[in-house]
Amino acid sequence: MYNEIDFDIIDTAAEPPAEEPARQYYFIAKCREWVREFERKNGCLPTACVTTFGCQMNARDSEKLAGILRQIGYGITDSENADFVIFNTCTVRDNANQKVYGRLGELNGLKRKNPDMKIALCGCMMQEPTVIEKLKKSYPFVNLIFGTHNIFKFAELLNTVYENENSGTIIDIWQDTDRIVEDLPVERKYPFKSGVNIMFGCNNFCSYCIVPYVRGRERSREPRDIIREIEKLVQDGVVEVMLLGQNVNSYGKNLDEPMTFAQLLREVEKIEGLQRIRFMTSHPKDLSDELIQVMKESKKICRHLHLPLQSGSTEILTRMNRRYTKQQYLELAGKIRREIPDIAITTDIIVGFPGETEADLEETLDVVRTVKYDNAFTFIYSKRTGTPAAAMEDQVPEEQVKKRFDRLLKLVQDTAREQTAKYQGRVMEALIEEVNENDSSMVRGRLSNNTIVHLPGDASMIGKLVNVSLDQCHGFYYIGHAVDSAME
Ligand code: 5AD
Ligand code: SF4
């Protein structure tokens, strides 16, 4: 595997190998020569900063970028005042794009002070041709642009940048791929927990969503590669994994030997030393009874299910191409709550989808009241060029959407507060994640149901599972205290 590779013995005078990941190891070795040159000149190693926009998938991709940069020899920093800065972008809503343009302006200011600084952009936003045109025209100081399908080629692209210092922006965007490259370096943000991709892309084409266009068709990783990765993570000290996919419930359909997500979970459950399993995201239309059964029987799968609703109106759901009705969703949520009583159900809801009426909003509010979400992410509909919804008539006026959004937000917050408070006084297991930034005598832990609890503690507790008494509920989180020694 990559961390057993000695990059110094790779012959960089030879031709690069054609196969992956050997080809990328070769380019990592080549980039290391450039870093050594930098060190000779400047007396220190160059620094690199990876900034992530968007979802957990992007966060995981950023760990891969940071892993490659680390192997090349960069010092990884959180400051964008660095020798190399890469923005891993999101385009799910327009405000994500606007944020990137704003931050690029700031980077240009830093680059003026440090002309050798290199700037790169990658991720979902780069898969949009109109974005590339705008960048070429208005942001010529960007050195490298690539998309979502060729992240594995990062070292090779970086080498191209080094070899073509003054030749403008290097752009490499692929339309789609069925390729999955394993065994590239990764730098994890947390030593004790990690995301693990189980699939890439999405085939659902919800009518408002740009993801299928920028992340491509759905493809699953081989179960043996997933298991091997998790076993390795556990050896390295990881106790919690988050299995990642746009729709984990359709995992395994395109494998040579098809396998269901529930079957995969059973295999992951068997990994010794692994303590907690999370996953994200579940499309309601594909959530099977088999999955509910596996969750119910499991000792490791966390008591949390993210089940995006998007709208409570069957008519809007049909226009969104979600392929379930309000009634079907309610039945599913009811079944889950009955079978797994302590489970937290969270959701995503969009307000202001084209044609949405006050009556449609009422349907959504009705679902929120009935399901009693433990948490909900609410979004104002954002028109994404190229999606079917962008061409729909009856776009809802902004002012009306804002009012509806505020009503929904108030209800989901009230409901989430009530749900969180249910556990007051109980003792529950928390995974301690970090020392509180503002008060070093307190640590932050996460319950199986994803609720946050703050308790007195210190850095030695990080990564441990601790039984915590949930003493005081403060809206969406608890203040508590540890009630016995850490359980290994
Ligand atoms: N406008 C607003 N929200 C959107 N989402 C996806 N596309 C859009 C859009 N065009 C939301 C959905 C999804 C979450 C990740 O982002 O609720 O579940
Ligand atoms: Fe987008 Fe729908 Fe796929 Fe989720 S399931 S990524 S909302 S198209």
Image (tube, rainbow, N blue to C red):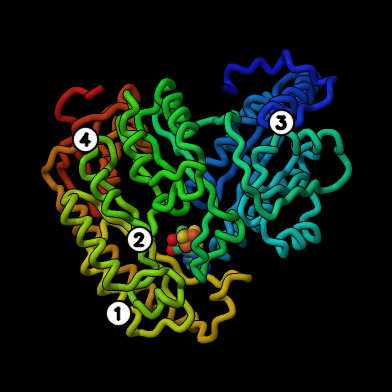
Which residue has dot 1 on it?
362
Rounded to the nearest whole Å, what is the CA distance between mark 1 and mark 4?
Answer: 37 Å
Q: Which of marks 1 and 4 is nearer the N terminus?
A: 1
Residue at 57% from the left image edge and 55% from the top image edge: 217
Q: Earlier in the sequence, mark 2 or mark 1?
A: 2
State the image coordinates of residue 348 (x, y, percent, origin top left): 38, 62
Q: Earlier in the sequence, mark 2 or mark 3?
A: 3
State the image coordinates of residue 265 (x, y, percent, origin top left): 34, 40
Marks 4, 3: nearer the viewer: 3
Furthest toward the left, the residue is 425
Residue 288: quadrant of the picture:
bottom left
User: In this picture, is 485 found above or below 361?
Assistant: above
Q: Is mark 4 on a helix, strand or loop?
A: strand
Q: Which amino acid, by three-letter code, is at mark 2?
A: Pro
Rounded to the nearest whole Å, what is the CA distance between mark 2 and mark 1?
Answer: 21 Å
Name the side, left or right, on which 334 lies relative to 80: left
Rounded to the nearest whole Å, what is the CA distance between mark 4 and mark 3?
Answer: 46 Å
Residue 415: quadrant of the picture:
bottom left
Marks 3, 1: nearer the viewer: 3
Q: Is mark 3 on a helix, strand or loop?
A: loop
Which residue has dot 2 on it?
284
Residue at 43% from the left image edge and 35% from the top image edge: 194
Which residue has dot 4 on it?
429
Q: Which of marks 3 and 1 is nearer the N terminus?
A: 3
Marks 2, 3: nearer the viewer: 3
Question: Cβ(mark 4) to ligand 1 < 8 Å?
Answer: no
Q: Are marks 4 and 2 in contact (CB under 8 Å)?
A: no
Q: How crowded is mark 4: few (under 14 residues within 10 Å), some or many (20 or more)?
A: many
Q: Which amino acid, by three-letter code, is at mark 3?
A: Glu
Which residue has dot 3 on it?
19
Q: Which amino acid, by three-letter code, is at mark 4?
A: Glu
